[in-house]
Structure formats: structure tokens, C-alpha cells
Amino acid sequence: MAIKKKSVELSEKNITFKIDKISYKVIRFYPSAMSLDVMVHDENGVKIGVQNIPFAHITKDVKKLIKPN
């Protein structure tokens, strides 16, 4: 039986994307929950903190880089 990964570390890949002047840097991906931990920065580059967002809310080009399958 295959062992499922609890999370996939993506911080070394430096995957970033912007939504409405807020930039996000992907930290890790949770395949079982289909969600991402991201570091959030405002338009001035100030760190806001870490958030967990659903995989479905990110852009298609970022989804291709993460490849959940």
C-alpha cells in the first residue's frame, strides 16, 4: 500500500504569484487537504504572515508548477 505524503515542501522552489496587489510565496502543499501554506506580503513588500489557502484559488500557471498528482 502506498504511503501518502502529509505535506510537500516547496519553499526551495521560490514559487511566487500575485493576486490583487498582494504577493504570495508558496511554502508547502498539503495533498490530502488540497491546500497551500503561503507567506503573504502586501504591495509595499511588508510581511503580513502565513496563511493557508485552497489549491483551487491559485492561478493555472502556478498550479502547473506544483503538480498535485
Image: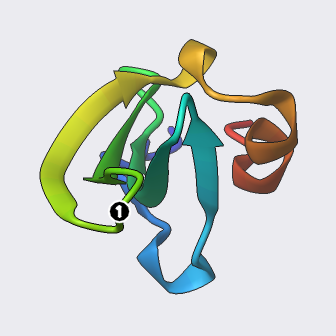
Q: Quadrant of residue 53?
A: top left
Q: Position of residue 2 (x, y in %)?
A: 52, 43
Q: Secondary structure at mark 1?
A: loop
Q: For the point 45% across and 51% down, which residue is it? A: 24
Query: Does 51 sit left or right of 22 as displayed?
Result: left
Report the label total: 1
Q: Is residue 4 above or below residue 13?
A: above
Q: Position of residue 45 (x, y in %)?
A: 34, 68
Q: Which residue is most to the front?
A: 44
Q: Position of residue 23 (x, y in %)?
A: 48, 51
Q: For the point 75% across and 38% down, which residue is it? A: 63
Q: Position of residue 32 (x, y in %)?
A: 40, 25
Q: Which residue is most to the bottom?
A: 12
Q: Is residue 43 above or below residue 10?
A: above
Name the amino acid, label 1.
Answer: Asn
The quarter of the rendered structure image containing the C terminus is top right
Task: Identify residue for label 1.
Answer: 44
Q: For the point 12% across and 52% down, which residue is it? A: 49
**Which color scheme is applied?**
rainbow
User: Residue 20 or 40: which is nearer the viewer?
Assistant: 20
User: Residue 6 or 59: which is nearer the viewer?
Assistant: 59
Query: Does 39 sit left or right of 19 as displayed?
Result: left
Q: Quadrant of residue 41?
A: bottom left
User: Residue 20 or 4: which is nearer the viewer?
Assistant: 20
Query: Does 64 sit left or right of 56 as displayed?
Result: right
Q: For the point 15% across and 52% down, which residue is it? A: 48
